[in-house]
Amino acid sequence: MNPPTTKELKARAQKLKPVIHVGHDGVNDAVVAALDKALSDHGLVKVRFTDHKTERKPLAALMEQRTGAHRILLVGHTVTLYRTPLDKSDQLQHGHGN
């Protein structure tokens, strides 16, 4: 299967609601862990900045760096990130399975 194009991901992202919220604590270990899990489960994830709104670009870059994700879209106070989800056999080998 070919990875989706940026255009396809942007179209899919329009239907998503933010599942991660960055509040007054910023991009801490808990946010990164939740984002990492969401990316592993779904691949495409929206993150909403409820605080640190003026720092959203560097914080989005930090999230990309810490999770290995790619920024697809940054609009307003929401960033959409994508990482190819692991298939179930990879998750079990890396300890990410249920």
Image (spheres, rainbow, N blue to C red):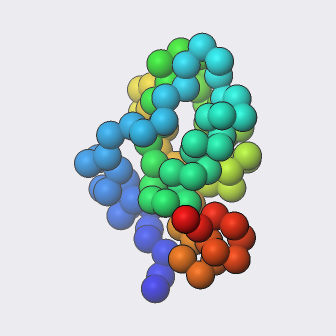
Give x and y (percent) for residue 67: 68, 51
Residue 22 versus residue 13 in the image, above or below: above
Give x and y (percent) for residue 54: 58, 16
Residue at 57 percent of width and 52 percent of height? 37
Residue 86 versus residue 14 in the image, above or below: below
Side of 45 relative to 8 (left or right):
right
Q: Residue furthest bottom?
A: 1
Residue at 62 percent of width and 71 percent of height? 91
Residue at 66 percent of width and 34 percent of height? 30
Residue 84 versus residue 82 in the image, above or below: below
Q: Residue furthest front?
A: 98
Side of 9 relative to 40 (left or right):
left
Residue 25 can be seen in this image: yes
Residue 36 versus residue 57: which sits nearer the camera?
36
Residue at 71 percent of width and 70 percent of height? 94
Give x and y (percent) for residue 83: 56, 60
Give x and y (percent) for residue 79: 48, 38
Q: Quadrant of residue 52?
A: top right
Residue 12 versus residue 23 in the image, above or below: below
Residue 58 can be seen in this image: no
Residue 71 versus residue 68: which sits nearer the camera?
68
> In the rendered view of the protein, which quadrant contains the C terminus?
bottom right
